[in-house]
Amino acid sequence: MSQNFEHSGTSWKGQRLKHDESMVDRLDPRVRIIVVSIFALAVVLSHDFYVLLLGLVSAVATAVIAQLNFKRTLRRVIAMDMFMIFLILMLPFTTPGEALFSIAGLPASKEGLLHALMIALKANAVVFALLALIGTMSAATLGHAMAHLRVPDKLVHLLLFTVRYLDVIGQEYKRMRRAMQARAFVMTVSKHTWRSVGYLIGMLLVHSLERSERIMDAMKCRGYKGQFYLMDDMVLQRQDYLFMMLSVPFFLLLIGLNFI
Amino acid sequence: MHIVDGALSVPVLATGAVLGLIGVAIGLKKMDYDHLPQVGVLSAAFFIASYIHLPLGFSSVHLILNGLIGLALGWAAFPALLVALLLQAVFFGFGGFLVLGVNVVNIALPGLLVYYLCRHGIATSSPKGAAIWGAIGGAGSILLTTIMVAGSLALSGEAFILAAKATLVAHIPVMVVEGFVTAAAVLLIRKVKPEFLNISEDWEDA
């Protein structure tokens, strides 16, 4: 993948990226997680073209309501599309069936084209829904919502730690890269580059781990026993019930259309 | 390396989800709270590694590091990679949601196999031997991951077989790069902080 489509520049800013306040932000995080899960399930399992189209349209509509940053979202969706583009381009030529057109003597089948389109619709619908409903939470909220949904404590802990370290390691990486640049290091295709990057990663891990051990000691010193406290007790509000009442018939429609 | 939503067939998705759940459950059981920072650091490192683009011919490759993660974590690689992939999926739209299980297994299982295969190798007293085992671990885990990705695609439909083969070929250079990088990282870590790779410091006396 080319550098232009790197998914987020060079640092994790999940916690600091601002997006405009929207209706979606007032919904209960637990409800958002569950709704996205059901939506993804319904979309991925369906095999009807119109259902998928409806799914994509509704997902994009949710993204618009959530006031996602247009450019950033587009960049991410395109990055994902680039990821599967080869798969999609190849499908029409590898699926047997009614020939639609041919390129350089290779016939492209209608079935293959349809299949490729369906994959693209599914992947994009799920990504839009994810970015709109879950991507708009802070990572800490996501962790707490998962804990409320009975995800094992250790896993939630790990998620929260990871989010914290992403920032630490990202900054450490930048610092060390700058130090290498100051010594005229340029990445090329050579053993020297690979070895240097290997050392860079090794040092990055060692630095970060030592730092994390200090954090752990400091936490233990303050009585940390492997338990954390969920400060926000989440209570379902009127808008949550409204959202659920809208979602349930929509899902029934999505699933039902498959059988018509 | 990540597969997006919608491409795989239901049996493959379900198998991936079940295997992933088992792996994560065992990993969580083996990981105690004192190890949490180490696991978190490596989980974050996997995330950061995908920013590190190394030039290669006309294009570039990014590091995956699942060999190194496996060597350092063993079973705990499963929860570590689940968290990293989940964060990538929900905050960057990178990868998919329902394929999370398949993706976790495809990336974590090779790491685990490498852990069992190479952990004695990287603890040998000669630095050269350790580097070679590190390279085997780094390149081997990419090889296994690629085979599993290709396998998940091929099992989902005959039409994917060409794409699966293309994936295999496209990742040969990645294996070479990852082998060298992992070898260097192993060499450095075993000198500076051997306990990170579960190496006791005895080898220095041997």
Image (cartoon, rainbow, N blue to C red):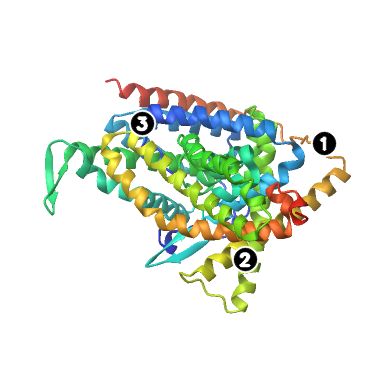
Q: CA distance from mark 2 to mark 3?
A: 40 Å
Residue corresponding to mark 2? A174
Q: Are marks 1 and 3 in contact (CB under 8 Å)?
A: no
Residue appearing at x 78%, y 34% in the figure: A227
Q: What label does residue B85 carry, if any?
A: none
Q: Tell me the chain of label 1.
A: A
Image coordinates of residue B43 in percent, x first then y, are 62, 47
Image height of B11 relative to A14, above or below = above
User: The disc labelled 1 sits on which kind of residue?
Assistant: Lys
Circles 1 and 2 on the same subunit: yes
Q: Nearer the viewer, residue A132 or A178?
A: A178
Helix, strand or loop status at disc 3: loop
User: The disc labelled 2 sits on which kind of residue?
Assistant: Lys
Q: How many numbered badges does the structure rendering display?
A: 3
Q: To which quarter of the image does residue B32 belong?
A: top right
Q: Nearer the viewer, residue A83 or B154?
A: B154
Image height of A78 relative to A231, above or below = below
Circles 2 and 3 on the same subunit: no
Q: Is residue A178 visible?
A: yes
Q: CA distance from mark 1 to mark 3?
A: 43 Å
Q: Is residue A194 left or right of residue A105?
A: right
Image coordinates of residue B45 in percent, x first then y, are 61, 53
Q: What label does residue B9 carry, if any?
A: 3
Q: Are marks 2 and 3 in contact (CB under 8 Å)?
A: no
Image coordinates of residue B136 in percent, x first then y, are 52, 51
Badge 1 density bin: few <14, some 14–19, many ≥20, Cα 10 Å = few
Residue appearing at x 83%, y 39% in the figure: A224
Q: CA distance from mark 1 to mark 2?
A: 33 Å
Mark positioned earlier in the residue sequence (1 or 2) = 2
Q: What label does residue A225 carry, if any?
A: 1
Helix, strand or loop status at disc 2: helix
